[in-house]
């Protein structure tokens, strides 16, 4: 595998940003690790971070490079700051960046990346789980599949819970989404996005989700899972004992890869 740290300029955001990119490489002499090259264009996973993190976190907390070494795929890990993958009310267009500009830039920098929707996955944890499903539901012509680990999938409920916990001012969420009334039913509400995608009669993304039963986002996950199932989405949802921490996400990202690529390969 090749690991690249890429600093580049975003015209959409009007500033320099960062991404780390893993590319497949056929290798024979690495001790304790097998490197597989790609067959044709690279299938690509866009792997998104949570609220407190940045583009480095999946490498620091998991063995993601080792897990994908046998698969011959590319992984794009962008930084998107604390913006919930949204065109925010304070003017920063992070949704436009992640859904439109970033895939275009990646495919220009790395022309071996496939442009096919079925070869492109969005995955992430917590805030990034919300972002991943948002890409699948709101940019489904680019992303053919989306996977959420402990995702904030019922964002309206999460907004209201944060507002109740901080009556003096839910400033982060207000700066991103506006008021709760502005959020509910908008393009930032995943259940509304799921309805719109269905109504457009376009190809629906494959969806995956896992959440721990002790996670504070668990009930919101159950609501979102039930909702998209009733709309007819192809959803694989799993739950097991666990809360909001990396030892679960490190294990479950391997399940995401096996689900997406439809393989039972041991990635350890």
Image (cartoon, rainbow, N blue to C red):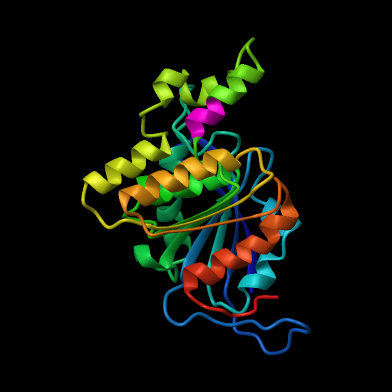
Give the percent coordinates (x, y) of residue 232.
Answer: 32, 53
Image position of 62 (left or right of 227): right
The magenta segment: 155-159
Is 70 rendered above or below residue 255?
A: below
Asked if residue 219 is among those painted magenta in the image, a careful observer would answer no
Q: In the current view of this chain or complex, which residue is farthest to the right?
A: 31
Is residue 98 visible in the rendered structure shown here? no
Is residue 190 visible in the rendered structure shown here? yes
Q: In which quarter of the image is the N terminus?
A: bottom right
Image position of 43 (left or right of 129): left
Give the percent coordinates (x, y) of residue 166.
Answer: 65, 16
Give the percent coordinates (x, y) of residue 22.
Answer: 60, 66
Residue at 59%, 82% (x, y): give it: 36
Residue at 62%, 67% (x, y): give it: 254
- What predominant SS class does the magenta segment belong to? helix
| Occupied quadrant, residue 104 | bottom left
Image position of 27 (left or right of 203): right
Q: In which quarter of the image is the C terminus?
A: bottom right
Q: In the current view of this chain or complex, which residue is farthest to the top?
A: 168
């Amino acid at each position: 595998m090749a690991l690249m740290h890429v600093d580049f300029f975003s015209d959409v955001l009007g500033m320099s940003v960062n991404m780390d990119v893993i590319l497949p490489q056929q290798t024979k002499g690495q001790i304790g690790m097998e490197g597989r090259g790609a067959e044709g264009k690279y299938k690509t996973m866009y792997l998104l971070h949570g609220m407190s993190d940045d583009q480095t976190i999946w490498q620091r907390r998991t063995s993601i490079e080792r897990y994908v070494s046998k698969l011959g795929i590319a992984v794009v890990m962008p930084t998107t700051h604390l913006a919930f993958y949204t065109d925010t009310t304070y003017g920063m267009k992070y949704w436009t960046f992640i859904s439109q500009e970033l895939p275009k830039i990646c495919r220009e920098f790395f022309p071996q990346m496939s442009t096919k929707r079925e070869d492109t996955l969005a995955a992430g944890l917590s805030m990034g789980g919300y972002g991943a499903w948002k890409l699948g539901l709101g940019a489904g012509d680019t992303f053919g599949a989306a996977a959420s680990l402990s995702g904030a999938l019922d964002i309206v409920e999460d907004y209201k819970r944060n507002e109740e916990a901080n009556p003096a001012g839910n400033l982060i969420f207000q700066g991103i989404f506006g008021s709760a009334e502005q959020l509910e039913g908008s393009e930032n509400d995943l259940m509304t996005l799921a309805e719109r995608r269905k109504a457009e009669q376009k190809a629906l993304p494959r969806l995956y989700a896992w959440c721990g039963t002790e996670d504070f986002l668990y009930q919101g996950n159950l609501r979102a899972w039930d909702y998209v199932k009733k709309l007819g989405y192809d959803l694989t949802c799993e739950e097991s004992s666990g809360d909001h921490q990396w030892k679960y996400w490190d294990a479950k990202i391997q399940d995401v890869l096996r689900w997406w690529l439809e393989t039972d390969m041991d990635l350890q």
